Image (spheres, grey):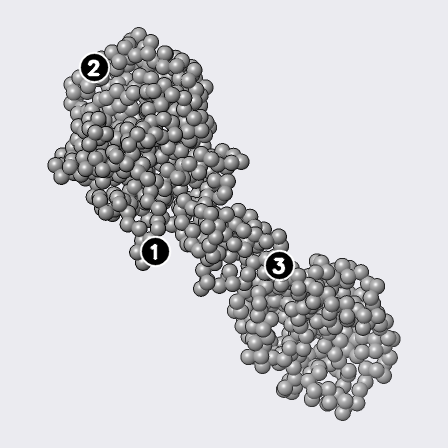
Amino acid sequence: MSNASRFDLDTLIGGLGAADQLTVQQALEWVAPKLADQLTGGGETLLAHAFETANILAGLQADVATRVAALLMLTPEVASTGSAKAPTPDPIDEQFGTEISQLVQGTRALSRLGSLASGATDGALDSLDQKEMLRKMLLAMAVDLRIVLIRLASRLQTLRWLAAEKQPCDPILARETLDLYTPLANRLGIWQIKWEMEDLAFRFIDPQRYKEIAKLLEEKRVERETFISDTIEQLARALAERGIVAEVSGRPKHIYCIHHKMRVKGLDFNELFDVRALRVIVPDERQCYGALGLVHERWAPESDEFDDYIARPKPNGYKSLHTVVADHDGRPFEVQIRTRAMHEFAEFGMAAHWRYKEASPRGAHAPAAQGAAVLEYDRQLAWMRQLLAWNTEASAQAGTPELSKPRRVAQDRIYVLSPQARVIELPIGATAVDFAYHLHSDLGHRCRGARIDGQMVPLHTKLETGQTVEIVTTKSGGPSRDWLNPQLGFLASPRARAKVRAWFNAIELAQRSTQGQALVEKELQRLGRTAINLEQLAQQLGFARADDLYVAAAKEEFSLRQIDAVFQPVAPEPELRAEDLLVHGARAEHSNAAGKSQVLVVGVGSLLTQLARCCRPAPPDAIEGFVTRGRGVSIHRSACSTFADLSRHQPERVIEVDWSQGGHGAVYPVEVTIQAQDRPGLLRDLSEVFARLRLNVIAVNTQTKASIAYMGFTAEVRDGSDLQHALSALGEVSGVFLARRR
């Protein structure tokens, strides 16, 4: 055990039982010869890196499996040479069990992801959204919290070694630490790792500024530490005298935190109030205000630097009292006062500081539109942080680390990489086709194959978090209708499914437009009107564009006979002759028998009558008669606007009329107007209503504008009750929002 004997095991096995200590020692002996004197890319020996990473985790009171996995994570992976029936055995699984083997595999996967992200091209990870996606991807890949802990500890050890050996650090690695790993440590509440990684990464990124702030702190370090200890003693004694049971502590400020606050708020070092800071934890909310009053009695408060987050909690639920006071020498310092419950929520709950700590310089928060997705992500993070708290409590009470509670987080999203290392978020069960449509609609339409981690796979292959996906396309073409078949499993994303449907709808619309144009042009050719402007013709027929006319004609929602009516001249009204008003009795009887008028002209025997088309009167409408030139008496509804205009100009032609009482079996045409949401089968459903009520439809006119169908039916009814029944039944048809008599 020559290689392993170089290391001090006291810290590594601290807090473990005898059996677990033996497991750690066996793991170190097993891994030492395999790593031998191999070096990392930065020059650190692999064995030393693994050992110190495990030591960091021991300081976090991690369980034995986590420490052993950290020791074994850098061992070479065994290439799979076995068959599907007899796969190559995993030596770690055989030697140390499945749990440790899975932790090692998960840690290796995260390490590979980090390598891919570091090699991202075209600024794929420059945006804040992409950095956040990569953090989510890390958590999604690490289905076990301990995998994230191992990865964070490994990165911290790399930075520690570079600093200790005074080796230069790759700027990409230092920036990645600040962008990716420290926010994760912050969100998970692993403050020790977060603060140290931030300071070390900042030291490599901006060494000059780091030294400036460190010098300012060092110049005042002794003074500051003396001040903090004296103030803690004074405040604790004063609180005890008031009968307030309180825990008072100093709150250290790290170099990167100071730099970040100075940069974001535009402050000088001397303007920072919380370089000197105290935190007071009391039993209940009432004593928070009691402690606040005592603080303000002893020291002069800064009026503009007080925040009551108990009375007005932050949107994320954070509660605390923040005040800045000045001592007798005018030196400002910050005091935070909260209950134990508020402190636990701030440290481990969904508030957790991280939203506003990582916000933009203006303090912008995540958009409210993210809603449920943000809350679910927060719940997962809060749950993970509570695991750390449980682990610490169990270690303190039982003397041995215990992390036996379930650690796996249910995921409803996956995170995959493009060839440029751009992170793409997709629903669980997504395929390469979903991935292609997420990137661009045209890429999805032309998708014909996919490579996952360099291997060609079928298009319906389900993607998994951490995979790199590359789409193979054709120069032209479109999607397959098979993609819309849920049984075949090509699409899991509603967004991608909608894009495929839109493509086929556009194709169908273009085909109908071509078909309808041929029908319209054929009808115009029959009428000898081939030189007509089709756009103007469409507008004359009530359509916004010629394409709308073509589609309506192809769907048989528009009668081509209506085109003929556009070109028909309006015939002049012939002069009225007195003898034209008189008809023979037989003719009148025939007219009544046929149900053409069923109108009696008061004071006159038999007159030729006709129902006016402008208002389509039917019993029991109130009616009036108007003597026309050559067409007898025209019967109008009393409320008809056309009749009102005629009677105003020629009152001498108005005569009194009434419905005949003996005209059983007569029918009267009425016009019904319908507005509805356009959909397939609408015309069929409306026609079935008329058929069910035994009403004969003698004319139909329909057109669609902006997905709204405007339809006119001329139906023959016996009286007003028939009409009311029809209107009521038509209004109940799905999609109809207006049915009325014209």
Q: Amino acid at mark 3?
A: Ala
Residue 237 in picture, x, y percent from top left? 17, 17
- Please tell me in which quadrant of the rendered image residue 354 appears: top left
Q: Which residue is mark 3?
A: 506
Q: Secondary structure at mark 3?
A: helix
Q: CA distance from mark 1 to mark 3?
A: 49 Å
Residue at image position (59%, 53%) is: 474
Q: Amino acid at mark 2?
A: Gln
Q: Which mark is residue 83?
A: 1
Tell whether label 3 touches label 2 (CB within 8 Å): no
For marks 2 and 1 on the same chain, the one whose residue lies earlier in the sequence: 1
For marks 2 and 3 on the same chain, the one whose residue lies earlier in the sequence: 2
Q: Secondary structure at mark 1?
A: loop
Q: Secondary structure at mark 2?
A: helix
Looking at the image, residue 222 lies above or below residue 62: above
Q: Amino acid at mark 1?
A: Ser
